[in-house]
Structure formats: structure tokens, C-alpha cells
Amino acid sequence: MTAETSDADVAEIETTDEIVAEDSGAPDATADVDSEDGDTGSGDDHLVEEGEVAGDYLEQLLDLLDFDGDIDLDVDGDRAIVSIDGGRDLVKLVGKNGEVLDALQELTRLAVQQATGERSRLMLDVANWRADRRQRLSALGTEVAQRVVENGGREELDPMTPFERKIVHDAVAAVDGVISESEGVEPKRRVVVIKR
């Protein structure tokens, strides 16, 4: 079962900070094959470069702000993932509802674009805020979907960002007997769960 989303939602998902790792399940035929000049043919090279540029930028920023933190670089699907953990007061870099984190992510993407010449879709997490938020939203989507299956009708959730709505839509799609839709206009757009 798939979540019902509009073309506008799809466009938002492509242009904002959602994590949508599309994996066909087939291994990358070039990922572990050495070319004749000794380089790997990995499609991850560009993402690794993005992560390194972002890590350097964030390290300088943390030094300027006098924040401690460990920077971890990873690649997940078609996206570089950069996370900052382990320091005191890192929640200040998250802000209310992740607003500071979103702004910091955009600045980091711009720094990467300036260095590489290509638009970046990297994902930044600080103090595991996005990972925790994803887990909570997924649990919320499942809980609401199960409640709608049992009680019928429909249930509207609070307004969310496109990133948050995508997580909820995915969780609802895993429950038989319900569908989800997005309704409203940004920034008041929300997920509605409806019994089939």
C-alpha cells in the first residue's frame, strides 16, 4: 500500500530536507570494481567529497562558536549524511522544532555547492535530533493508522514540514486498511489518515 501524496508534496520532498533513500536493491555494479588507473568506479565518491567539505566547514564553524562536538560522515543511498554529536550545549544548534538545525543544514549545503559547483542534498543531524524525530514520527504514524483502522473515520495530525509528513506517510502506508493524504497550505499543511 502506498501513501497518497499530491504532485506538490512530491516537489516539496525533492527540494527540502526529507530523507528519502531510494534503493533498488541491486548492488552498484561499479562500487567495488577497480578501474585500470587504480581508482574505484564508486558512485559514492562525489558524496564522500560532499561529506568531507561539509565536515571541514562545520568544524570551522564549531571552532568559531566555541562548541565541542565530533563530526561523523556517512553516505546513505544517494545522500551524504553528516552528524555532530558528543559536545556540550549542542541542542542550541538544533533550536526550537529544529529551526536552527534547518538553517545550519542550508548553510552547509551552500558551502558544499560553492566548493564542488553542484547542488548538495546532504543531510545534517545534530545530537541525533533528526534520528530521534524520525523515530517518534514513525511511531506516531503507525499509532494513528491503527487507531483509524479500529475506530474508522479520519484523523488529522498537527501541521508538519515536508520531511516530517513523508515519514508519517511511510509509516501509515505500512498499515493495511488506511491511506494518508496531505491537506492544507504551507506552513499549515498536515497529514490526514483515512480508513479505506
Image (cartoon, grey):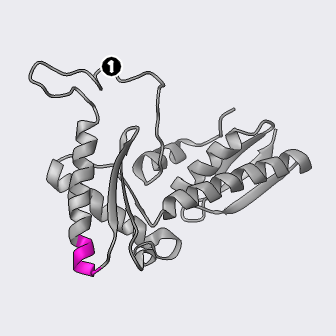
Which is the main secondary structure of the residues drawn in magenta? Answer: helix
The verdict on residue 153 being magenta is no
Residue 98, placed above or below residue 89: above
Camera-side residue: 100 or 181?
100
Q: Quadrant of residue 58?
A: bottom left
Question: Seen in the image, is 54 located left or right of residue 99?
Answer: left
Q: Is residue 161 visible?
A: no
Q: Residue at x 78, y 46 (%)?
A: 194
> What is the x, y in percent for residue 120?
29, 49
- What amino acid is found at the position of numbered circle 1 in the picture? Ala
Q: Residue at x 33, y 65 (%)?
A: 70
Camera-side residue: 58 or 69?
69
> What is the x, y in percent for residue 12?
47, 50
Give the extent of the magenta segment: 61-66
Question: Seen in the image, is 175 located left or right of residue 25?
Answer: right
> What is the x, y in percent for residue 103?
37, 68
Residue occupying the far left of the picture = 37
The verdict on residue 62 being magenta is yes
Q: Quadrant of residue 164?
A: bottom right
Residue 136, placed above or below residue 49: below
Placement of the C terminus among the 4 image quadrants: top right
Residue 135, placed above or below residue 178: below
Disc 1 element: loop
Question: Seen in the image, is 142 located left or right of residue 33?
Answer: right
Mark 1 crowdedness (10 Å alpha carbons): few <14, some 14-19, many ≥20: few
Q: Residue at x 64, y 50 (%)?
A: 168
Query: Which residue is disc 1 drawn over?
Result: 29
